[in-house]
Amino acid sequence: MDMENIVQQSVASLVLKNHQIVPVLEKYNIDFCCKGKLSLQEACRDKGINVSDILTEIESVQKDAGGRSMPFVEMSQAQLVNHIIVHHHYYVRKAMPVIMGQLEKVAAKHGEHYPYMIKVKELFGIIQNEMDQHMRKEEVVLFPRIVEVERELGIDPNLQIPKDYLSGPISMMENEHDQAGDIMFQIRALTNNYKVPSGACTTFQVCLAGLSEFENDLHQHVHLENNILFPRVLESTLIK
């Protein structure tokens, strides 16, 4: 493996080539979706991480995976849309009210001793509201347009697509991805990387684990859209 080449590649491109390295990046809190354009070296520098430690684990994962490429790059746009809705939108809608219920209990019972959990509850409330609206806009506006355009281009490859028909809503979704990522970063910082306080009750522990899982899913969710689906859509609709 050319280590020098690996560290200079963007984090997003590395994930595209081998999705199995995602757990390694998650372990070191490397954002491969919203900040996926950073090189691995730059991402490690921002986090104060020794890049050689990550390279060792990535190499091990790649050997175990046998160099297999992630299946998402082989999917059609319609298949990607369906995967995102079935796996990620479904998870988010199911998880958010559960996590919020737990946060309300923890903030009420332990807020005096752990006031940061009150702030976490407020921030997650913002996430819950924004994600509900965000997913609705994707499912009602953007995703149907993506499926429609892919189908029509399959019939007529020279079809002219209005410039903002897809690029406009895609730009809006990417901005909202950044906002959600920033809020989850604040939650991670407030909870010291979801560290469970000594003597924390079961609800407190489960709540922090749920928040960590939610952030991990968000990263993979945004990665599929920002780094795979959206670039492919924009490339396919360039004026010929």
Image (tube, rainbow, N blue to C red):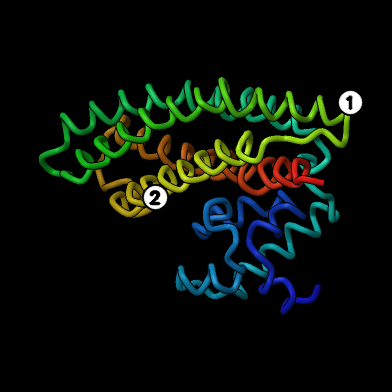
Question: CB atoms at circles 1 and 2 under 8 Å apart?
Answer: no
User: Is residue 231 found left or right of 206 in the rendered image?
Assistant: right
Q: Residue at x 70, y 44 (%)?
A: 234
N-terminal of the pair, mark 1 or mark 2, is 1
Kind of residue sitting beneath label 1: Ile
Q: Residue at x 66, y 69 (%)?
A: 55
Q: Which residue is at the front of the view, 221 or 214?
A: 221
Mark 2 neighbour density, 10 Å: few (under 14) some (14–19) many (20 or more): few
* Residue 75: image location, x then y, percent: 80, 35
Identify the residue position indicated by label 2 in the image.
Answer: 182
Vertical relation: 13 (above or below) 93: below
* Residue 126: image location, x then y, percent: 31, 34
Kind of residue sitting beneath label 2: Asp
Q: Residue at x 45, y 26 (%)?
A: 95
User: Is residue 156 found left or right of 106 in the rendered image?
Assistant: right
Q: Nearer the viewer, mark 1 or mark 2?
A: 1
Q: Which residue is at the front of the view, 165 or 181?
A: 165
* Residue 9: image location, x then y, percent: 69, 68
